[in-house]
Image (cartoon, helix red, strand yellow):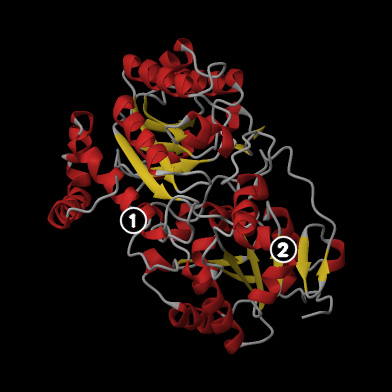
Amino acid sequence: MGSDKTLRIRFGGDMRILLVCPQENIPRSSESYPSGALLLLGSMLHERGHEVLLLQMISDGVDAAGVGEHARKFKPDIVGITMNTYQTRSSREVSRAIKQISKQILVVAGGPHPSALKIEALRQFPDIDVVVEGEGEEMFMEIAEGRSFAQIPGIIYGDTMNAPRQFIQDFDYIPYPNLDLIGGRKGMKRFQGPYPGGPMPSMFIMASRGCFGQCKFCNTPVFWGSRVRTRKPEAVVNEIAWLYRMYGMREIYFQDDTFNANKRWAETVLNLIIEKGLNKDIFYRICFRVNKALITHDLLQLAKRANVWMIFYGTENGNQEMLKDMGKNITIEEIERSFRMTHEIGIKTTTSFLIGNIGETRKTAYDSIALAKRLKPYCVGFSLVIPFPGTVLRDEMIAKGHLLQGDYDRYGADQCVIRTDALTPDELVKLRTYATCSMLLQPSNMEFIFSARNIFGVRTKLRVLKEILKHKLKVG
């Protein structure tokens, strides 16, 4: 669609808007949370008087044809699709199903994947009319208001790529998430909460956007930018109180990439939680960075007083040279210090490791396994590297010939689409399996392994471990 398209304002500006969170390329039967992007859009649109229908394809149990049936009944003017790289196939099917109903329905897509692809996204998804790049809420509101496309910075349509939009500096205007859009308290029961399992019901909050990290594998800068922007602490804490009062939330997960990037701001938020008594019936999990300048005993003690029960640290590798090459800008010493201090305070830890970054060998993978054992986290995850579009890692892997799969529809959390100089895809998969199962034998993981909410996942891992022993898979 190459022409500028201005929507007709109906019923005094009220629009019917369908928001869709697609299925993943490798289908899943459950998900942790509703889409934060769609909840934000839906809440803002609802406040402005538009009629909104929000579909979570996984939790609602609908396929593309089912979305089409909802669209026939709802008769939307606009369909908004949020898309990450694991959702490309479903997004294409959904947009096609919408256009088969009516070519006049405007299909708008946002999220990390189309934001990274930019104008190429419209070529790969021919039934999508508009891409909103990066933070999309202001752009989507302007589209819904009927503003001319040519006057909306940050959108891409037809063969036109408008001037980029500046990142939002003050986003305290955003409304509280209207969970009634997904069925309120009852609807939240469809979501299993974050892994590993904790107090339920659980809901997330984003108190800041952006990350100053320079990790080559991360696509956060594509979407949120590399400068950390924070909300007012009072606004964050008021949202927590509202979620508890309105929906009975027992756990709040701060999804910020680095909650302690601004240590003074983080301390203010935690102090307000304590002052308002929101540490009595609500538990918190949080993402911290391990740098020595950002982790202190005082901060951890304050987190403990605020009822933070779990801290996630992104470790990613147990080899110092690998960490340097990945752009992590952290040291093994800082990692071990942070875990040791956190455990001494009495807060549980969880962490992640990546298998398959450039330079990965059997030795570096074993270094990661050894570090994971020394850290003694409550829970640890080993993942295969996925070179997302827009990342430095993807460019480097293409240059080295290490990217083996260019079809995004084949991407998934458990798929191996790369190799390294030293390791084949099959060897990377075996190393990841071996690393995951080896942690089952660690005493520090026993509480997590045998907790009621995790028992079924453990059975699966034990079956994999049995296969390793049965076939004597050699990864060393």
Compared with residue 32, is residue 251 higher up or lower down, i.e. above or below?
A: above
Q: Which residue is mark 1?
A: 186
Q: Which residue is mark 2?
A: 118
Compared with residue 93, is residue 446 higher up or lower down, i.e. above or below?
A: above
Quarter the N terminus occupies? bottom right
Q: Nearer the viewer, residue 432 or 162?
A: 432
Residue at 38%, 57% (x, y): give it: 31
Q: Nearer the viewer, residue 296 or 17?
A: 296
Residue at 67%, 58% (x, y): give it: 116
Q: Say what amino acid the circle numbered 1 marks.
A: Lys
Q: Position of residue 406 (x, y in %)?
A: 56, 68
Residue at 48%, 20% (x, y): give it: 334
Q: Nearer the viewer, mark 2 or mark 1?
A: 2
Q: Please tell me whether mark 2 sits on a helix, a strand or a loop.
A: loop
Say left or right for 83 vs 419. right
Contact (CB < 8 A) between labels 2 and 1?
A: no
> Label for residue 86?
none
